[in-house]
């Protein structure tokens, strides 16, 4: 098809259909989860808090009615609540017994399903989460009273209609675009047509390496699009911050987005450290004064005109609450107060935006009404390889040129529908442009995290052997004459995988115990004193959430590991994205006679898991099961050769 517009529109229309398929799949999965899973299981998965205690209620700086709630049980469970998520409150009609994945199959004691709870018929939105305290936005005052008077109250993550609606709208807008910048970018991204560039002399940055410097120069020269491909440990964020800083020498303001709140927080914090004024739309996942100080909500509250605005809003609420029949001046009074409040809101808003050089938010957050009508010369999308293409278009509508940064050899976007995944919904915009326009991609080639032997396999398999170790890290190790990577084979009659509960997940108890025994043995070799003095940190990773929960419980109960608990993190691969530790231990779980390895076939996840380690990587897995797959066979052979 020679017409780039027709080809792009056809492919985007196909994406729209696949997005609808994903929407229906996720909605149905959520319905089944809600109807079939008991409260305790949802709590253990981190998808619910129960029982809850309600706290104070108030109107926030954005004039939304907010309610504080506090978690009173299962405080050790890592939950999935964060800013922007949709939630529903419920009342429990029965008390369900506890389930514990360290004992029994987990099938018993959770037979009472949705009949044991009653959902309230309205949704709320998470505004803020800090440990066991959460603030939610409630739609109306009468709803607030219902919640405050309810007994045995709980809250659950609910199906997120908003994100899908915004992605659909974005795709529709892109498909319909004609004769404007959006149509141009659409046709460019879906064709082999060459992107345009500015021309100027190469700039030098003494604190960047050669490929980082090249990436910044290419970003600055790009009129349409540029891609920074950053393998693990290669300083992608450093490069991106420098590119943003240099762009701001030429432009008054830029938009910086990412798929997740955590990724937005990370890049925002680095920009603030660089001295760049950031305005963060939405609340951060890590709640501290530094992070909160550059949020829109906090800055709005801190404005000198805010007390006056608060008084006006209060007066309006009181006027409505105490309205008397036959009060003919009511509308006049409300109109006068509204006009004054609106004037103040606009003034505060424009001053906050006038002071900021970077506006930072999630891709979905770029549709926030606060950003209505805003246009930017440049949009930076970090972790672009983790975002659905439709989500990227929400933000691209506001920009003239796009810079994508990420690594399509690490975590992909989450797609629940297998049919949609196979048909291409998981193909990201970054992957599409990398394939269509390899000349716009800069691969960062020097990594500063890992021992050379830990890094080498990843570099050879995923990056064509192009990534090299900086001399300062290539020989780093915890112990002298230590092998940086070990694979401990767990294949024997005792070791086997099993399911916990009907839908909780897959665990391997023997491997979990061996994981802790291995760590204990390695700690003994290092010595307790050195571990504590040098604060050597450890990450225990498993691709399976149920195994993570099991390992967390075992670490918590281990007397030997008690002094080191602050230095040990246990999480899924996704939970470790963007992080690093001195020692990484990976429990792969799968152990069966058929060589079935499930989603361990997604090798990008394994790439993330292995490349979190600075100095020592220990893999525990059933060699007989895993090495039937060529990747794991090659990895095992590579590790065995290192022993020679």
Image (cartoon, grey):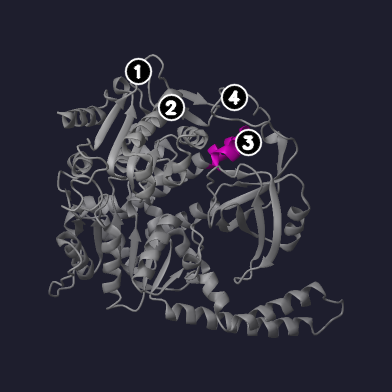
Residue assigned mark 1: 594
Q: Is residue 227 visible from the viewing direction of this image? A: yes
Q: Residue at x 35, y 18 (%)?
A: 594
User: What's the CA distance linking mark 3 and mark 1?
Assistant: 33 Å
User: What's the CA distance linking mark 3 and mark 2?
Assistant: 25 Å
x and y percentages locating residue 433 in the rendered image: 25, 54
Name the element at disc 2: helix
Q: Nearer the viewer, residue 250 or 105?
A: 105
> Which residues lie in the magenta part?
27-46
Q: Earlier in the sequence, mark 3 or mark 1?
A: 3
Q: Is residue 482 above or below residue 436?
A: above
User: What's the CA distance linking mark 4 and mark 1?
Assistant: 25 Å
Which labelled disc corresponds to residue 107? 4
Mark 2 Cα shell of 10 Å, populated few (<14), some (14-19), many (≥20): some
Residue assigned mark 2: 513
Mark 3 Cα shell of 10 Å, populated few (<14), some (14-19), many (≥20): many
Q: Earlier in the sequence, mark 2 or mark 1?
A: 2
33 in magenta: yes
Q: Is residue 128 above or below residue 308?
A: above
Name the element at disc 4: loop
Q: Earlier in the sequence, mark 3 or mark 2?
A: 3
User: What's the CA distance linking mark 4 and mark 2?
Assistant: 22 Å
Q: Residue at x 22, y 36 (%)?
A: 482
Residue assigned mark 3: 40
């Amino acid at each position: 098809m020679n017409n780039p517009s027709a080809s792009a529109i056809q492919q985007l229309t196909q994406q729209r259909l696949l997005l609808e398929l994903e929407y229906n799949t996720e909605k149905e999965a959520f319905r089944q989860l809600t109807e079939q899973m008991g409260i305790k299981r949802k709590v253990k998965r981190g998808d619910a808090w129960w029982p809850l205690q309600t706290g104070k209620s108030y109107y926030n700086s954005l004039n939304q009615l907010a309610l504080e709630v506090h978690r009173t049980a299962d405080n050790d469970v890592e939950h999935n609540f964060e800013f922007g998520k949709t939630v529903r409150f419920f009342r429990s009609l029965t008390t369900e017994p506890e389930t514990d994945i360290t004992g029994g199959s987990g099938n018993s004691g959770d037979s009472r399903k949705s009949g044991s709870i009653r959902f309230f018929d309205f949704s709320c939105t998470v505004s803020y989460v800090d440990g066991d305290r959460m603030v939610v936005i409630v739609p109306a005052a009468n709803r607030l009273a219902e919640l405050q008077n309810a007994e045995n109250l709980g809250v659950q993550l609910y199906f997120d209609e908003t994100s899908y609606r915004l992605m659909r709208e974005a795709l529709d807008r892109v498909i319909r675009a004609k004769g404007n910048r959006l149509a141009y970018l659409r046709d460019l991204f879906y064709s082999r047509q060459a992107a345009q560039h500015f021309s100027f002399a190469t700039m030098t940055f003494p604190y960047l390496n050669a490929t980082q410097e090249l990436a910044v120069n290419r970003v600055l020269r790009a009129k349409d699009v540029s891609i920074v491909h950053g393998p693990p440990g290669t300083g992608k964020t450093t490069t991106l911050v420098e590119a943003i800083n240099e762009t701001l020498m030429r432009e008054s303001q830029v938009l910086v987005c990412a798929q997740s709140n955590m990724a937005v927080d990370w890049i925002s914090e680095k920009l603030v450290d660089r001295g760049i004024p950031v305005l963060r739309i939405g609340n951060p996942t890590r709640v501290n004064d530094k992070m909160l100080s550059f949020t829109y909500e906090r800055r709005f509250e801190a404005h000198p005109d805010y007390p006056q605005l608060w008084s006006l809003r209060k007066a309006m609420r009181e006027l409505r609450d105490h309205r008397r029949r036959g009060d003919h001046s009511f509308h006049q009074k409300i109109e006068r107060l509204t006009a004054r409040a609106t004037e103040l809101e606009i003034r505060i808003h424009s001053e906050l935006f006038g002071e900021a050089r970077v506006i930072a938010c999630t891709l979905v957050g770029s549709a926030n009404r606060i950003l209505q009508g805003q246009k930017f010369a440049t949009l930076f999308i970090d972790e672009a390889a983790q975002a659905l293409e439709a989500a990227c278009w929400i933000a691209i509508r506001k920009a003239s040129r796009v810079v994508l940064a990420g690594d399509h050899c690490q975590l992909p976007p989450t797609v629940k529908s297998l049919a949609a995944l196979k048909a291409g919904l998981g193909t990201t915009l970054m992957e599409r442009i990398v394939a269509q326009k390899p000349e716009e991609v800069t691969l960062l080639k020097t990594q500063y995290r890992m021992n050379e032997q830990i890094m080498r396999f990843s570099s050879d398999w995923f990056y064509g052997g192009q990534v090299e170790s900086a001399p300062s890290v290539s020989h780093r190790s915890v112990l002298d004459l230590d092998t940086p990577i070990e694979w401990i084979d767990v294949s024997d009659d005792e070791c086997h995988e099993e399911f916990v509960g009907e839908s909780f997940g897959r665990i391997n108890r023997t491997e979990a115990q061996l994981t802790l025994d291995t760590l204990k043995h390695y700690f003994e070799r290092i010595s307790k004193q050195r571990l504590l003095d040098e604060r050597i940190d450890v990450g225990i990773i498993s691709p399976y959430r149920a195994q993570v929960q099991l390992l967390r419980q075992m670490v918590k109960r281990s007397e030997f590991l008690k002094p080191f608990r602050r230095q040990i993190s246990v999480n899924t691969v996704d939970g470790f994205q963007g992080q690093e530790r001195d020692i990484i231990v990976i429990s792969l779980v799968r152990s069966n006679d058929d060589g079935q390895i499930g989603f361990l076939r997604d090798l990008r996840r394994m790439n993330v898991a292995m490349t979190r380690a600075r100095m020592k990587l220990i893999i525990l897995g059933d060699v007989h099961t895993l090495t039937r797959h060529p990747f794991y066979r090659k990895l095992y052979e590579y590790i065995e050769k290192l022993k020679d």
